[in-house]
């Protein structure tokens, strides 16, 4: 559905001749009907990537295709298939109501939307009672819903959502997770950027983690979680009082503690082959193994592992 190839974007630094690389040669594909998350800390290059896809900025290098049409060479054909909610609150006219925004923005795209149709979309999103209030009087969560309503009225196959839960309270964030899932069930292809790991954990099919302008990993979410779950082990061994803790440290445990004569420690192993080596080492130290368990991981741990360089 979307193909980004070798995208590079640099910006001129303010009051300086130097340039900073916001996006450094990234490539990825988004499949039809999937929820694809661009996860990364602030400044990683997520917004720049999204703005390049929707044609708002021209990349220095690289190619972007939407349904086989080049954003650079066949702009209007490519962009016909996507709508976008950008980060922050500049997606709507604040002096107009949600209904007026829907009719106005669809009009720009050459699409006539009846008032009844606009109301129906607002009803689906649960803000029909705000249909005729000016946008600037609405809460952040409602404004965000109104911006999504404008996208839905355009009836594009692809939605780009930049930080959709930023600045929302917990309840609205949870509601947005439901809305995003629901849109996906209706057949939309969704690219969302976020630094909200709970959102990724709840809705994403695939995840690209961005850090310092590069994609450091791009994987099915389930696979990513399984990969990490397979690597983390918790060991409990019986101490034999021979200064074995110093020797255990040679295994580089991520943490350890001693409780009576039981030592508990955690290891991240690159492959299951290494597990046998650890067991050999424990045998050499004459430590009796009590238990070995695989550790469950949460997404936060994965994120930190990839972005803490
Ligand atoms: N218009 C701009 N001019 C100069 N630098 C920019 C501009 N927009 C973004 N940047 C810089 O590019 C990098 C990536 O920014 P951005 O794409 O907004 O990241 P993210 O959305 O992941 O937080 C940051 O270092 C940011 O300061
Ligand atoms: Mg951003």
Image: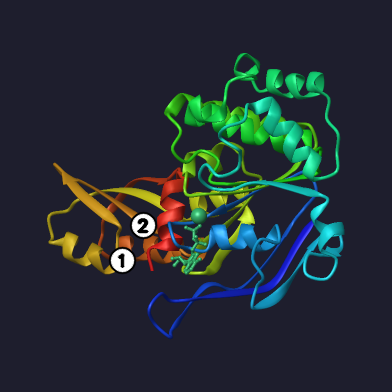
Q: Is residue 264 left or right of residue 292?
A: left
Dividing the picture into quadrants, the one containing residue 130 is: top right
Dividing the picture into quadrants, the one containing residue 85 is: top right
Which residue, as the protein is rendered here, is positioned at the far front? 95
| 31 and 89: which is toward the camera | 89
Figure label count:
2
| 204 and 62: which is toward the camera | 62
| 149 and 258: which is toward the camera | 149
Q: Is residue 71 left or right of residue 160?
A: right
Residue pointed to by mark 1: 251
Q: Assign a secondary structure to mark 2.
A: strand
Q: Tag 1 or tag 2, which sits nearer the N-term?
A: 1
Check whether the beta carbons of the residues at disc 2 and disc 1 lie within 8 A of each other. yes
Q: Quadrant of the C terminus?
A: bottom left
Dividing the picture into quadrants, the one containing residue 48 is: bottom right
Mark drawn on residue 267: 2
State the CA–CA distance, disc 2 to disc 1.
Answer: 8 Å
Q: Residue at x 60, y 30 (%)?
A: 145
């Amino acid at each position: 559905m979307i193909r980004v190839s070798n995208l590079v974007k640099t910006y001129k630094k303010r009051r300086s001749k130097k340039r900073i690389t916001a996006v450094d040669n990234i490539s990825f594909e988004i499949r039809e009907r999937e929820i694809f998350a661009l996860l990364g800390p602030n400044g990683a290059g997520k917004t720049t990537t999204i703005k390049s896809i929707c044609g708002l900025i021209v990349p220095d290098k690289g190619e972007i295709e939407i349904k086989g049409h080049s954003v650079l060479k066949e702009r209007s054909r490519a962009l016909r298939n996507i709508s976008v909610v950008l980060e922050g609150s500049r997606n709507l006219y604040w002096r107009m109501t949600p209904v007026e925004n829907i009719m106005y923005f669809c009009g720009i795209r050459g699409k006539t939307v009846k008032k009844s149709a606009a109301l129906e979309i607002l009803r689906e999103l649960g803000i029909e009672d705000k249909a005729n209030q000016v946008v600037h009087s609405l809460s952040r969560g409602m404004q965000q819903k109104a911006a999504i309503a404008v996208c839905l009225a355009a009836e594009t196959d692809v939605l780009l959502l930049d930080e959709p839960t930023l600045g929302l309270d917990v309840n609205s964030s949870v509601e947005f997770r439901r809305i995003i899932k629901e849109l996906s069930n209706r057949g939309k292809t969704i690219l969302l950027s976020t630094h909200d790991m709970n959102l990724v954990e709840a809705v994403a099919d695939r995840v690209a983690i961005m850090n310092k302008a590069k994609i450091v990993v791009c994987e099915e979410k389930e696979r990513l979680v399984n990969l990490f779950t397979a690597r983390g082990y918790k060991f409990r061994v019986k101490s034999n009082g021979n200064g074995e803790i110093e020797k255990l440290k040679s295994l580089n445990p991520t943490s350890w503690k001693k409780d009576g004569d039981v030592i508990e420690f955690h290891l991240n192993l690159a492959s299951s082959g290494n597990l046998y080596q650890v067991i050999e080492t424990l045998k050499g130290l004459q430590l009796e193994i009590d238990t070995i368990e695989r550790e469950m991981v949460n997404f936060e741990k994965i994120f930190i592992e990839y972005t803490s360089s």
